[in-house]
Image (cartoon, rainbow, N blue to C red):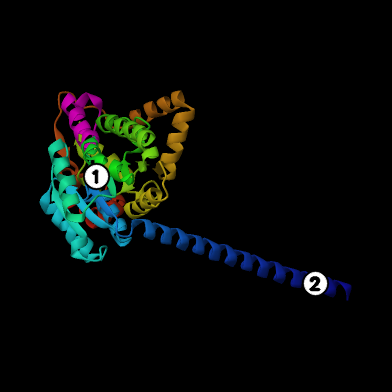
């Protein structure tokens, strides 16, 4: 009889514990959902009606950011060199219903490596919408390959596209933001702007410049009402491998790079990255690093620079060897047919969605 009572009591206790656990889980889910809703509402309030200029806005992360800002009610100005790509991007945003009306998105073909084009972009956007609330410096290029197959021109081109284009736009928009004592400037740097990765030297050198400029600008203008956000993403599935450039053993360089940028466990989706960037900008953060791997690499590099340098040496040993006597450069699309196809499904999906294919 006593054993029966004990078993009955144990059963009741287990049921109560299970019920309590479910209740706690349900409460946690409810609280998390409520917190997410609160954050989303805050982001919506801070973006609704704002004028956002996005360079490199015709494809990849730039287009993903345009979609995210647009869905939050922002008015968009997309800038890029290719007018046809910009028009496709505009149509995609309308097709996705990411903007409320056609008048909420304008495009401006320009070459931001030229300061006069950056001035023209700011003037046109200001004339159309009245002012600029946010500038996203996202335009850039990437060339992959060993240093022996790069030329000085590779480094010069990377600095012009990745650093000077953003510098020109920042200097063009800064006077009106300082006059209003408000504004947001977002620089898309890279984890490569904190740690120098082998076979990406022109890119990483230019991104170190972006990171340094962005962090220094934040220190100078934050007290004047302007927020500056430095974004250091790791690998992202934006489909950019097709437009990246490759030198040396171009086919093998393309294979390792596109594979690393394609796998969900290693890379972040463009949509998730864009959402995090918009949230960080509206929260007033000064810097974010995207993907756990990039966060770990950045912290490890700061704490143990010598060990990080050795790790990069090991990474370099696993990468393709230089090809003597060549500095030829190929776009990823030109070597795409020789890739590792089954593993590239996610990369192809990103390429199609974010306007990376013709």
Is 18 left, or right, of 273 in this rendering? right
Give the residues drawn in magenta, as a range: 144-165
**Residue 37 screen position, x and y as percent:** 46, 63
Q: Is residue 234 visible?
A: no
Q: Residues within 10 Å of mark 1 (few under 14, many from 20)?
A: many
Q: Is residue 258 left or right of residue 329?
A: right
Q: Is residue 4 above or below residue 325?
A: below
> Residue shown at 37%/48% (left/top)?
281
Asked if the magenta segment contains residue 151, the reply would be: yes
Judged from the image, the secondary structure of the residue bearing numbered disc 2 is: helix
Rendering coords of residue 335 (x, y %): 17, 43
Q: Which mark is residue 63?
A: none
Residue 263, image x, y percentages: 35, 49
State the residue position of label 1: 241
Q: Residue furthest right?
A: 2
Q: Nearer the viewer, residue 339 or 225?
A: 225
Viewer-nearest residue: 337 or 5? 5
- Which residue shows up at 24% across the image and 44% down it? 241
The image quadrant of residue 168 is top left
Which residue is label 2 attached to? 9
């Amino acid at each position: 009889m006593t054993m029966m009572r004990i078993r009955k009591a144990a059963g009741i206790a287990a049921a109560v514990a299970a019920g309590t656990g479910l209740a706690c889980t349900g409460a946690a889910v409810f609280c998390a959902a409520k917190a997410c809703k609160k954050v989303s509402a805050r982001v919506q309030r801070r973006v609704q009606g704002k004028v956002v200029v996005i360079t490199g806005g015709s494809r990849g992360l730039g287009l993903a950011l345009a979609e995210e800002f647009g869905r939050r009610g922002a008015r968009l100005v997309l800038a890029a060199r290719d007018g046809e790509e910009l028009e496709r991007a505009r149509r995609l945003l309308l097709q996705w219903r990411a903007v409320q009306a056609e008048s909420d998105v304008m495009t401006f073909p320009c070459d931001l490596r030229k300061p006069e084009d950056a001035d023209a972009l700011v003037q046109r956007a200001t004339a159309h919408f009245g002012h600029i609330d946010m500038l996203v410096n996202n335009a850039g290029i990437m060339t992959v390959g060993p240093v022996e197959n790069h030329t000085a021109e590779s480094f010069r081109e990377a600095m012009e596209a990745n650093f000077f284009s953003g510098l020109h736009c920042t200097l063009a928009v800064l006077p009106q933001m300082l006059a209003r004592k408000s504004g947001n400037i977002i620089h898309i740097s890279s984890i490569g702007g904190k740690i120098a990765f082998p076979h990406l030297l022109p890119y990483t050198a230019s991104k170190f410049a972006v990171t340094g400029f962005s962090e220094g600008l934040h220190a100078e203008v934050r007290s004047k009402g302007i927020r500056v956000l430095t974004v250091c993403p790791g690998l992202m599935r934006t489909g950019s491998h097709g437009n990246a450039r490759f030198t040396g053993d171009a086919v093998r360089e393309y294979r390792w790079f596109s594979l690393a940028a394609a796998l969900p466990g290693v890379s972040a989706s463009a949509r998730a990255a864009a959402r995090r960037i918009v949230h960080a900008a509206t929260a007033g953060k000064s810097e974010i690093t995207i993907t756990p791997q990039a966060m770990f690499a950045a912290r490890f590099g700061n704490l143990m620079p010598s060990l990080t340098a050795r790790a990069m040496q090991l990474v370099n040993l696993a990468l393709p060897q230089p090809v003597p006597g060549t500095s030829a450069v190929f776009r990823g699309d030109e070597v795409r047919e020789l890739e590792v196809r089954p593993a590239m499904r996610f990369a192809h999906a990103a390429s199609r969605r974010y306007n990376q294919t013709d």
